[in-house]
Amino acid sequence: MIAWLWVIASSVIAYLTKLAGYLVPREILERPAVVRVAEAMTVGLLAALVVVQTLSADGGVAADARILALVVAVVALLLRAPFLVVVLLGAGVVALGRYLGLN
C-alpha cells in the first residue's frame, strides 16, 4: 500500500512541476541567464546519468565492458558517426566484452 502512495505522490509532484513550467512568463524563460543555466543543467544531468549507468553495479563501482563501450562510443561521436552507428558500436563492444569475460 505504501508503494502506491509514493507513486501517487510522485505523479502529483511531476504534474505540478510541469504545470509550473507553463505558468512562468515567457519573458523570464527567454532571459540569457536562464537559457544558459537550463542548457548547462541538461548537459550536467546527462553526463551524470551516463557515469552512473556506466560505473555502478549492485551499489558499488564496477569496471567492466561498459567502460570500453563508452570509450568506443565517445570515439565514434568524435569521428561524427551517426547516432545509430554509435549505439550499435557500443552495444557490440559490450556484447563482445562480456563474451570475452569482462563482466
Image (tube, rainbow, N blue to C red):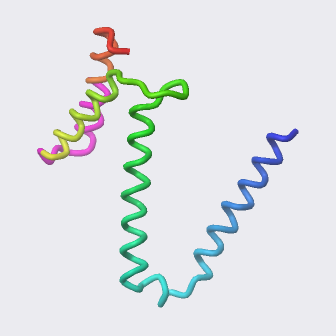
Query: Which corner quadrant holds the N terminus?
Result: top right
Above or below: residue 85 compared with residue 60: below
Q: Is residue 83 magenta?
A: yes
Give the left or right position of residue 83, taking residue 42 as reference.
left
Give the left or right position of residue 54, taking residue 13 as reference.
left
Q: Quadrant of residue 3?
A: top right
Q: Nearer the viewer, residue 66 or 77?
A: 66
Q: Nearer the viewer, residue 48 or 10?
A: 48
Q: Residue at x 37, y 49 (%)?
A: 47
Query: Which corner quadrant holds the C terminus?
Result: top left
Q: Quadrant of residue 50?
A: top left
Q: Which residue is most to the right?
A: 1
Question: x%, y% of residue 60?
Answer: 50, 27
Question: x%, y% of residue 36?
Answer: 36, 74
Q: Residue at x 22, y 41 (%)?
A: 74
Q: Nearer the viewer, residue 89 or 68?
A: 68
Main SS category, magenta section: helix
Question: x%, y% of residue 98?
Answer: 34, 14
Above or below: residue 75 compared with residue 19: above
Question: x%, y% of residue 33?
Answer: 39, 81
Give the left or right position of residue 25, taking residue 35 as reference.
right
Q: Which residue is most to the left?
A: 79
Q: Which residue is most to the bottom?
A: 27
Specify the segment rendered in magenta.
Answer: 79-92
